[in-house]
Amino acid sequence: MNVRKIDTFSGHRDSVYTIISDGSTSGFYSAGADGFVIQWDLKKPDMGKLVARAGSSVYALCFDPENNQLWIGQNFEGIQLLDVSSGQISKSIKITTAAIFDIRIYKGKAIVALGDGVIVIIDIESFAVQKHIKVSEKSIRTLAVNPETNELAVGDSSHNVHIFSLADFNLKQTIQSHTNSVFSVRYSPDHRYLLTMGRDAHVKVWDVANGYELIHNIAAHMYAINHIEYSPDGEFFATCSMDKSIKVWDSRTFKLRKVIDRSRHAGHGTSVNKLLWSSYQDQLISCSDDRTISVWEIQD
């Protein structure tokens, strides 16, 4: 596997915490500690467009293609909705005084993970809070939806992963999964596996059909793993870590294929916080506490 850094986007003034697709093949949004939300295009390197200024840091973004809206989780303030067509903030709601760590949209609902251990369910059409679910005494860090089983996986800082029914948001199962905070949960593209990871630097693979039985426990990084992202074809997944590295894995064998770091590939100098694997020329995008966004060409 060959890796080459092809671009570095610099526009943020502080740590970049999150990157998500803007719904197009080559565009994406980024946000971070400076409160800036910037839209980028892989076809036009380093030509970022500032689309919103949140009043505080932003950990969570979520694009709603059906309504052409960008959900912005403004830490300690609430949710802002950016109307992408007009470029204006159309709605806002103060739902918390805690950090907002993740947002997922599914069947007309927005599911929001909070730093006070609560999940908030918002009806998108009415933009009204429908439900508060107290999950943990510590932060809810990450969410993942499995449309095949109609389940929601929730990772928290109490070392657990909780499985909820998306039909009624009742708790189905709690997996005592890690020895420290769970930072990222992700269902495989075929929905057969749930992958979980976090501060203990392990990737764990759970068999969904067999009651979330543990089938792999991989000592993947030196320090906390912040995020996981699958390649567009599902053949690989990448993990990123506080150890400043990105690692690429075979999604069938769960074997390590490549390490991307500063010494070998001019990688990030500090914690790598989030990944996005674009369908545009199969490019992998990473963001970091070093204030930059890197774009990687990966060829198998």
Image (cartoon, helix red, strand yellow):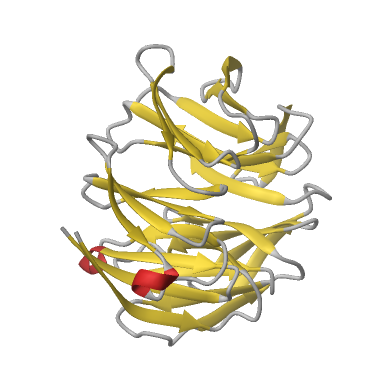
Q: Position of residue 180 (x, y in %)?
A: 65, 34
In this rendering, the answer to whether 125 lies above or below 1 is above
Give the quadrant of the N terminus.
Answer: bottom left
User: Which of the pair 293/23 is nearer the observer?
Assistant: 293
Q: Position of residue 129 (x, y in %)?
A: 71, 40
Rendered residue at 34%/85% (across/down): 44
Please state if 70 lies on the left or on the right of 251 as rendered: right
Q: Position of residue 268 (x, y in %)?
A: 48, 71
Q: As drawn, which residue projects farthest toward the right?
A: 97
Q: Quadrant of residue 23?
A: bottom left
Q: As drawn, which residue projects farthest toward the left?
A: 300
Rendered residue at 59%/79% (across/down): 12
User: Which of the pair 117/87 is nearer the observer?
Assistant: 117
Q: Position of residue 45 (x, y in %)?
A: 37, 85
Q: Quadrant of residue 130?
A: top right
Please state if 16 lies on the left or on the right of 146 as rendered: right
Give the quadrant of the C terminus.
Answer: bottom left
Rendered residue at 64%/45% (across/down): 126
Rendered residue at 60%/42% (across/down): 199
In this rendering, the answer to whether 120 lies above or below 2 is above
User: Which of the pair 263/68 is nearer the observer?
Assistant: 263
Q: Quadrant of residue 265?
A: bottom left
Visible in this render: residue 147? no
Visible in this render: residue 66? yes
In this rendering, the answer to whether 149 lies above or below 40 is above
Please state if 110 lies on the left or on the right of 278 as rendered: right
In this rendering, the answer to whether 16 lies above or below 103 is below
How many marks are shown on the rendered structure? 0
